[in-house]
Image: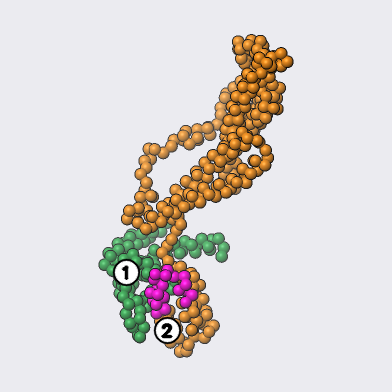
Amino acid sequence: MNLLDRYLLSVKKFLPWKRQDDILAELKANLESQLEEKESDLGRPLTAEEMQEWLKHLGPPMVMAARYQPQQYLIGPTIFPMYWWVMRLALLWCLVIYSVVNAVTIVASSPSGAAVFDAVLHAPGILIITAAWVTAVFAAIEYTMARSPEKFPAKAVSQLDWSPGTLPTAEEVGCEGKRPRSHAHAVAEVVFGFLWLIWLLLIPNHPYLLMGPGAVYLRVSPYQLAPVWAQVFWCIVALNVVQLGWRLIDLVRGNWQKSRAVQHMTVKTIGLIATLILFTAPHRVWVLLKHPLTDTARYGANVNSINHAVYAALLWVVAISAMIWLWQIGQFGLDFCRKRVAAKK
Amino acid sequence: MTLPENLFENLRLELRRGCLTLAVLAQLRQEHYGYTLRKALAQHGLEIDESTLYPLLRRLESQGLLVSQWREEEKRNKRFYRLSNDGEFLFVELLHEWRELNKSIHNILERH
């Protein structure tokens, strides 16, 4: 068996089995004609080195055979943009749903580092399964389109029914917030921020500022707020001081027109910390009896019910706030990366 | 291969791909088998690798643009190809398209 026969035998292994004999016979005839002509021009047979050189020029057997295969895509260029869009959406929602479900489950059962670690460890597996399903569905669509082009023409996908009138406006895609703030707006923010802070600081000694006539009931009722509320209160005060200070510095420096993405994220993070402090109150107690020795028998059950209800409400508040915070921090990171890439260009 | 060279190679291949089909269809107005077709194209200045041309013939035949026939010539069985009726019609259409495109590019170049 000469080198050409060995080459053809190797090509055969990679050819579609239904047509391999036919293709091989044709390829053999063409290559033998070419070889004959080469040898006729030289007036002698090709040497082993020349033969090797020629076959090497033809390309590896697998590559030669691959060209005879019909062009196959798992997901072709026509539906790929749609596939990619659906994939991103599916992964995002999968992550959000998985995180919410796990956060609620962990908090409702027994919050521990091990439970959180376990949830994080399982997240990649869930995402891979989601990606595999999306890919499988689109691969099936591609397969159907390739097999029945008359029923599912590629044009039908690339020219989906749409109208320019249905395109979202700048307000709908959230571009309206890019408009720079006016000086008057920035001054008003500082003035009202200052007034708001004063009002906040007056509340502990003058609860009617927050509760109105209800403050009287607070004074005569057998209940009082647990110490954790004081910690949260000072957290809120700190939040407002930071915000006011930042706005004041921006105003003095003349930077009020600039984007406040970092400020917004800092404020939201402090807000989330305050919520977490409240949620992790010692012994899950948010309301106490003023005189436990005398009132427990009468109001003890009420206090327990109130604390239980506050816990259930805070559980949802924390889960939803954490999800929103994660989403916003993700968007903030994405914006930051985009700006850095744009700046480099 | 540097990035610009690589890019050039990709664009060159893209540019050639459509032209090769047109050249093969043009040449197969006369009957040829694989090797003589390759030689005929090379004589007109269009070199095509074996691994590109032979599978292309199969593809064009499966699309109904070529018809083929096994026949013995010089004591060897060879597969001869020529344009089908559909292929002839499509070739005229493609040739018109190619000439229009060529004319447009020529006009653009003339203006600058």
User: In this picture, is A113 found above or below B20?
Assistant: above
Q: Which residues are magenta?
A: A9-29
The picture places residue A284, in percent across and down from the top left corner, at 67, 27
Q: Is residue A22 left or right of residue B90?
A: right
From this viewpoint, which residue is outermost toward the front?
A297
Dot 1 amino acid type: Leu
Residue at numbered disc 1? B66
Q: Nearer the viewer, mark 1 or mark 2?
A: 1
Local packing at callout 1 (Cα closer than 10 Å; few below 14, some 14-19, many 20+) is many
| Residue in the image at 38% along x and 57% along y | A146
User: In this orientation, which residue lies closer to the viewer: B21 or A295?
Assistant: A295
The picture places residue A124, in percent across and down from the top left corner, at 58, 48
Look at the image and give the colour of chain B: green
Q: Which chain is orange?
A: A
Q: Which quadrant of the figure has residue A285?
A: top right
Residue at numbered disc 2? A37
Indicate yes or no whether the magenta region holds residue A23: yes
| Residue in the image at 71% along x and 22% along y | A227
Local packing at callout 2 (Cα closer than 10 Å; few below 14, some 14-19, many 20+) is few
Is residue A183 among the parts visible in the rendering?
no
Q: Which quadrant of the figure has residue B25?
A: bottom left
User: In this picture, is A113 found above or below A36?
Assistant: above
User: In this orientation, which residue lies closer to the viewer: B93 or A56?
Assistant: A56
The picture places residue A223, in percent across and down from the top left corner, at 66, 16
From the image, give the main secondary structure of the stretch colored magenta: helix
Q: State which chain disc 2 sits on.
A: A
Q: State which chain disc 1 sits on.
A: B
Dot 2 amino acid type: Glu
Judged from the image, the secondary structure of the residue bearing numbered disc 1 is: strand
Judged from the image, the secondary structure of the residue bearing numbered disc 2 is: helix
